[in-house]
Image: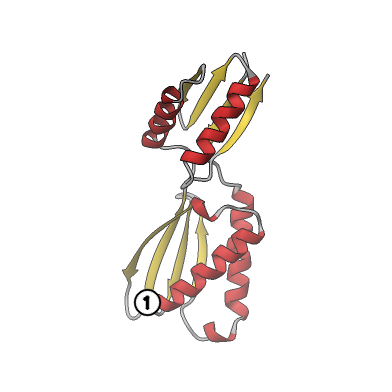
Amino acid sequence: MPSFDTVCEADWVEVKNAVDNTAKEIATRFDFKGTAAAIEYKDKDKAVHLLGDAEFQLAQIEDILRNKMTKRSVDVRFLDVGDIEKMGGDTVRRIIKIRNGIDSELAKKIQRLVKDSKIKVQAAIQGETVRVTGTKRDDLQAVMALIRKDVADRPLTFNNFRD
């Protein structure tokens, strides 16, 4: 039976490259000289830490990061921007988590969407993916279009297409 998996996975190599390029630009820009402006990628929590002297500086760093990610074909919808935290002195920090996997709420929403569509396919939640199986390839393609249209706030991709 034909099937495909719906996943939400960022390309970690490209994310790390975008963070490294942002760090290089911060080091060379004149308006960041002599400030606490910095960016680093924490691999264990899959998050990007932004440091700066003020909120507007964090906004500039975040803008540079978004531009670098776009140039590297990484969807910026993967970014889950946290609140600004005060640190010692005048330094502020913002943690941006990189979304990975489909959480249970979104998986249930996708499953309900597929069931309510009355297309003859089945959706099954398998960990952080949603597998959709059906008898016709056209039905699966219709479900892909339906998911793309209704779940626009997450960068979902479809892989493991079996015929």
Q: Position of residue 54 (x, y in %)?
A: 39, 79
Left or right, 132 with respect to 82, comes to right
Q: Secondary structure at mark 1?
A: loop
Q: Position of residue 80 (x, y in %)?
A: 43, 54
Q: Nearer the viewer, residue 110 or 63?
A: 110
Residue 4 against residue 100 in the figure, above or below: above
At x 49% / y 43%, what residue is drawn? Answer: 100
Quadrant of res 64: bottom right
Q: Which residue in the structure is indicated by mark 1?
A: 91
Q: Nearer the viewer, residue 100 or 132?
A: 132
At x 47% / y 83%, what residue is drawn? Answer: 35
At x 36% / y 35%, what residue is drawn? Answer: 105
Quadrant of res 103: top left
Left or right, 89 with respect to 79, comes to left
Q: Nearer the viewer, residue 66 or 19?
A: 66
Residue 148 against residue 5 in the figure, above or below: below
Q: Quadrant of the C terminus?
A: top right
Residue 107 against residue 46 in the figure, above or below: above
Q: Is residue 148 visible?
A: yes
Q: Position of residue 32 (x, y in %)?
A: 53, 82
Looking at the image, how many numbered discs can be counted on the residues? Answer: 1
Q: Is residue 5 visible?
A: no
Q: Position of residue 45 (x, y in %)?
A: 45, 50
Quadrant of res 51: bottom left
Q: Quadrant of the N terminus?
A: top right
